[in-house]
Image: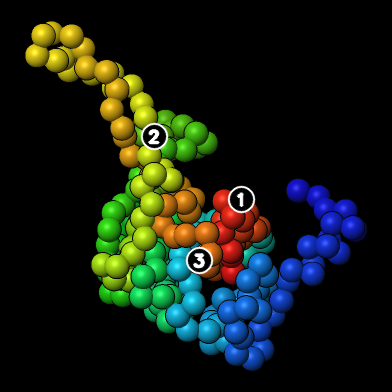
Amino acid sequence: MTLGSGERAALSERLMRLTAPAVPSHLIGRTVCQDLVEALPHLPPGFVDLLIVDPPYNLAKSFNGRAFKPLADNRYERWIDSWLCPLSRVLKPSASIYICCDWRCSASVQRVGERYFRVQNRITWEREKGRGAHRNWKNCSEDIWFFTVSGDFTFNVDAVKMRRRVVAPYTTANGQPKDCSPVRIPAVEPGPDFDERDVAACPCTGLGDRSWAPAAISRRIR
């Protein structure tokens, strides 16, 4: 993606750095362009309704020029804990948490997440990209762990429910094939877990591609 000078100037107005405790109203609609560890102490407590985290997976990869080497599972879990524990402070008691991962680090995400939150579900979704392998199965799926702070959380099922035709050898009592039935399809991005005036936080925005999702469905984002 290439930005023109006018676009850079307009988008730069959204950026901010935290050097002192911030209030929620100053964070709404803004992007904190700063190391998460540096910003965490300045974030206000209990103001986030939905937390979406897409951290670096435990792979040998370069993220924007910064090399990331695989860690032993226990070290990777300590790294997750180093930012997930302090992030729990900014969540409301009714908040929902989604953490993305691949199959290698899925167990680590579950173990660390269970220390602070309640596991509600694990969403496994198929992605179209991915290369084939000569000596292994093609890796074409990833996990998203769904946690909540408590048993009191929002889940608007109508926001993600779809009606699909059932293709299966099921028949009615008179031998006729059954028609279609409602199937609940969880969304990869936020939709069912909070209301329009709630606040969503995406601490691992990378190139910023996560920031647009709540805005596209009329949610406020930090």
Q: Position of residue 23 (x, y in %)?
A: 60, 84
Where residue 161 appears, as percent x and y from the top left, is: 38, 39
- Judge by depth and name the residue closer to the eye, 192 or 10: 192
Q: Nearer the viewer, mark 1 or mark 3?
A: 3
**In whole angstroms, how far apart are the C-alphas of marks 1 and 2?**
19 Å
The alpha-carbon separation of the residues under discs 1 and 3 comes to: 14 Å
**Furthest-top residue in view?**
175
Q: Which residue is mark 3?
A: 198
Vertical order, 127 against 79 (above or below): above
Residue under numbered circle 1: 216
Q: Residue at x 86, y 64 (%)?
A: 9
Tell me if mark 1 has few (under 14), some (14-19) or many (20+) residues whose alpha carbon lies within 10 angstroms of its own.
few
Asked whether the residues under the numbered discs 1 and 3 touch, taking CB atoms below 8 Å apart as contact, a structural biologist would say no
Give above or below for 156 relative to 80.
above
Residue appearing at x 57%, y 51% in the figure: 217
Tag 2 secondary structure: strand
Residues at discs 1 and 2 in contact (Cβ within 8 Å): no
Asked if one can make out residue 4 in the rendered structure from this viewpoint, the answer is yes
Q: Quick one: label 1 or label 3, which is nearer the N terminus?
A: 3
Left or right, 113 with respect to 13, comes to: left
Marks 2/3 in contact by CB < 8 Å: the verdict is no
Alpha carbons under labels 2 and 3: distance apart: 24 Å
Is 116 placed left or right of 216 in the picture? left
| Residue at point 33%, 21% (across, down) | 165
Please name the amino acid that badge 1 sits on. Ala
Secondary structure, mark 3, is loop
Residue for badge 2: 162
Q: Residue furthest right?
A: 5
Q: Which residue sits at x=22%, y=17%? A: 178
Category of crowding for the residue at label 3, using alpha-carbon neighbours closer than 10 angstroms: few (below 14), some (14–19), many (at least 20): some
Question: Which amino acid type is marked by label 3?
Answer: Asp
Pick whichever, 212 or 66, lies toward us.
212
